[in-house]
């Protein structure tokens, strides 16, 4: 049919009347020659396609016959493996149609813990008790947080991801569930849903990517572990020689240090900026600044049987820096990673207790510094020190003599601190075994020795981690 159409088109072209400015005989000859070449090329390509189709059909029929014979015949004796033949187009199409979409990955984790002090009595002295997962965790064997992630491109404009945290208490939590744009242009991209905020350095990393078993004290005290809001995020990558990224977020404000205020609009706002680059062929760096502003309404906690609630504004500043070294940029043999963050939180509003209310103001800070050294392939050692400062706290109910300071023991001035060392072994990029020891002094007069043996195993495809 294609040949008939081509010949008809050629006949029509030759039979059409020529205008006054038609080409001369030489031009007509050239056109006829070009048409002949096109016809020959077309016929050659058509024959080649027909030949490929016949070969693909023959290969598919042969595979079906072989499968039928294998089912009918007894199992053959294994033979020496032969080089695999190139896959036919039909086989390639069949393989693609069986591909799973979306991609799925599962991270399994667990610990064996030996904790000297009762973990049920753990607290940060000098700080309002935060929501979320804080402290050293439970003793003995523990099933850690398993992460199930589904991700896929939705269409040319959007992609989506959902990560479910399966806890050892037989609970399933939505850790992340968001959509994001794919290449809006000019370095801009958006994300909407629940996500790990871009503030700070460690906050946006999943637990299995941490270099230690637990988060630093500052993250636990100021964010209750991690800040994972429901909202929208915008990121802009500047077209500069060095890495420069700016971001902003609008969120519900339900996450600590805020709480659910049953209000419309954005209850929390945050901005962040980070820059980075290379220093020669072996070194690289990144630094960032972040700011979070949110509010709380009757954010309650109980201290020695006294119900207390805070209402007011909460502001958090974060400064972070990371330095990496690997000989000639190759980290497989040896590498060093230095990482640190400093945080400050200011809260102002009112504190209510025992049917009374008064002014409350606090200015508190915390920091951590850690270093991890891969001294040989698959083996790493790390050291981390973190510290909190309860700073200056004003409790109006105490200053005016309405209530005694003894009714607020958790807010008594103190500077918690902790030192941790770890050694881990990674047989591959999908598995890791870690031994960690920590000396925790978060409570006055109670030094806590904490020993962990942890495993982290990844199943399935997993996205690359950030810098």
Image (cartoon, rainbow, N blue to C red):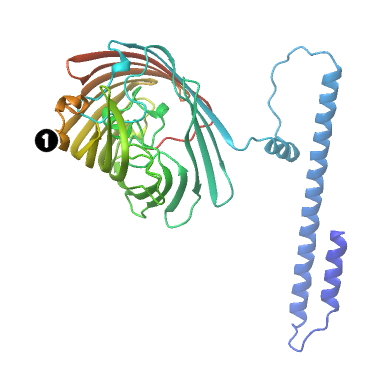
Q: Is residue 373 left or right of residue 168?
A: left
Q: Nearer the viewer, residue 357 or 216?
A: 357
Q: Quadrant of residue 299?
A: top left
* Image location (x, y in percent) of residue 176: 47, 37
> Looking at this rendering, what residue extends furthest in the bottom direction?
20
Give percent across and percent down for residue 424.
36, 18
Q: What residue is shown with label 1?
A: 399
Drawn side of residue 72 relative to residue 155, left or right: right
Residue drawn at the location 82% of the way across and 75% of the way down: 13
Task: Give the answer, above or below, for where 350 lies relative to 140.
Answer: below
Residue 95 as seen in the image, left or right of residue 295: right
311 or 106, nearer to the observer: 311
x%, y% of residue 268? 35, 46
- Residue 342 seen anywhere in this rendered image of the structure: no
Answer left or right for 270 relative to 161: left
Which x, y percent locates residue 364?
19, 35
User: Residue 413's quadrant in the figure?
Assistant: top left
Asked if residue 83 shows in the view, the reply is yes
- The correct choice, above or below, for 153 with respect to 168 in the image is below
Instruction: Decide: is 324 above or below 35.
Output: above
The residue sitting at 71% across, 31% down in the picture is 85
| Quarter the N terminus occupies | bottom right
Quarter of the figure that contains the C terminus: top left
Q: Which residue is located at x 73 percent, y 87 percent?
A: 21
- SS category of the residue bearing label 1: helix
Of 434 and 300, nearer the camera is 300
């Amino acid at each position: 049919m294609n040949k008939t159409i081509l010949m008809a088109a050629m006949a029509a072209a030759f039979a059409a009347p020529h205008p006054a400015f038609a080409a001369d005989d030489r031009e007509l000859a050239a056109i006829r020659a070009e048409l002949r070449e096109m016809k020959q090329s077309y016929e050659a390509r058509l024959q080649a396609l027909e030949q490929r189709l016949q070969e693909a059909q023959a290969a598919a029929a042969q595979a079906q016959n072989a499968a039928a014979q294998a089912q009918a015949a007894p199992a053959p004796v294994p033979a020496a493996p032969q080089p695999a033949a190139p896959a036919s187009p039909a086989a390639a199409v069949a393989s693609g149609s069986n591909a799973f979409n979306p991609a799925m990955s599962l991270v399994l984790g667990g610990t064996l813990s030996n904790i000297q002090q009762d973990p049920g009595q753990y607290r940060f002295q000098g700080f309002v008790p935060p929501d979320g997962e804080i402290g050293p965790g439970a003793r003995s064997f523990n099933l850690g947080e398993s992460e199930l992630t589904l991700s896929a491109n939705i269409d040319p404009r959007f992609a989506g991801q959902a990560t479910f945290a399966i806890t050892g208490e037989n609970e399933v939590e939505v850790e992340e569930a968001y959509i994001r744009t794919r290449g809006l242009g000019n370095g801009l991209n958006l994300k909407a849903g629940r996500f790990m905020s871009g503030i700070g350095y460690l906050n946006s990393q999943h637990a299995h990517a941490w270099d230690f078993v637990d988060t630093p004290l500052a993250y636990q005290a100021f964010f209750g572990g991690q800040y994972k809001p429901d909202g929208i995020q915008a990121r802009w990558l500047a077209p500069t020689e060095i890495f420069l990224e700016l971001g902003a977020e609008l969120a519900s404000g339900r996450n600590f240090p805020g709480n659910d205020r049953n209000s419309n609009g954005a209850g929390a706002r945050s901005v962040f900026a980070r820059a980075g680059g290379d220093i020669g062929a072996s070194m690289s760096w990144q630094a960032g600044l972040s700011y979070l502003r949110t509010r709380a309404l009757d954010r309650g906690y109980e201290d020695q049987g006294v119900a207390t609630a805070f209402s007011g504004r909460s502001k958090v500043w974060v400064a972070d820096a990371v330095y990496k070294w690997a000989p000639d940029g190759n980290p497989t043999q040896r590498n060093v990673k230095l990482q640190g963050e400093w945080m400050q939180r200011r809260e102002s509003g009112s504190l209510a207790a025992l049917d009374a209310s008064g002014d409350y103001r606090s200015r508190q800070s915390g920091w951590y510094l850690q270093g991890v050294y891969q001294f040989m392939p698959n083996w790493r050692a790390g050291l981390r020190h973190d510290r909190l400062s309860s700073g200056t706290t004003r409790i109006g109910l105490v200053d005016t003599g309405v209530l005694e300071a003894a009714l607020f023991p958790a807010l008594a001035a103190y500077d918690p601190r902790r030192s941790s060392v770890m050694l881990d072994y990674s047989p591959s990029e999908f598995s890791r075994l870690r031994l960690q020891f920590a000396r925790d002094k978060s409570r006055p007069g109670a030094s806590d020795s904490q020993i962990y043996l942890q495993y982290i195993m990844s199943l399935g495809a997993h996205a690359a981690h950030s810098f």
